Amino acid sequence: MIVVGIVLLVIGFIAHIAILWTIGMILVVIGLILWVLGALGHAIGGRRHYW
């Protein structure tokens, strides 16, 4: 999710498409939140870790 967000950020920045920039930013933030929660040991969606 983080990688897809970064790719969308780059494409949105290069092509000057604001919606891709926004979606990319949202995906990066959600991916980071899930990564941190998984690293702290919280179960996310029934899993003990998030890949």
Image (cartoon, rainbow, N blue to C red):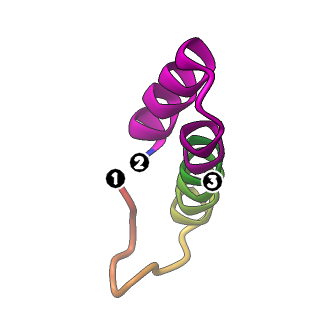
* Among the 4 quarters of the image, the one containing residue 14: top right
From the viewer's perspective, tell me whether residue 49 is left or right of residue 40. left
Between 37 and 25, the one nearer to me in the picture: 25
Disc 2 versus disc 1: nearer the observer: 2
Separation (CA) of disc 2 from disc 1: 9 Å
Residue type (three-letter) at the residue carrying disc 1: Trp
- At x 62% / y 37%, what residue is drawn? 21
- At x 54% / y 40%, what residue is drawn? 20
Task: Note whether 11 is above or below 27 in the view shown.
Answer: above
Between 27 and 34, the one nearer to me in the picture: 27
SS of the residue at dot 2? loop
Q: Residues within 10 Å of mark 2 (few under 14, many from 20)?
A: some
From the viewer's perspective, tell me whether residue 13 is left or right of residue 5. right
The x and y percentages for residue 12 are: 56, 27
- At x 66% / y 51%, what residue is drawn? 29
* Among the 4 quarters of the image, the one containing residue 42: bottom right
Separation (CA) of disc 2 from disc 3: 10 Å
Marked residue nearer the N-terminal end (1 or 3): 3
Q: Which mark is residue 1?
A: 2
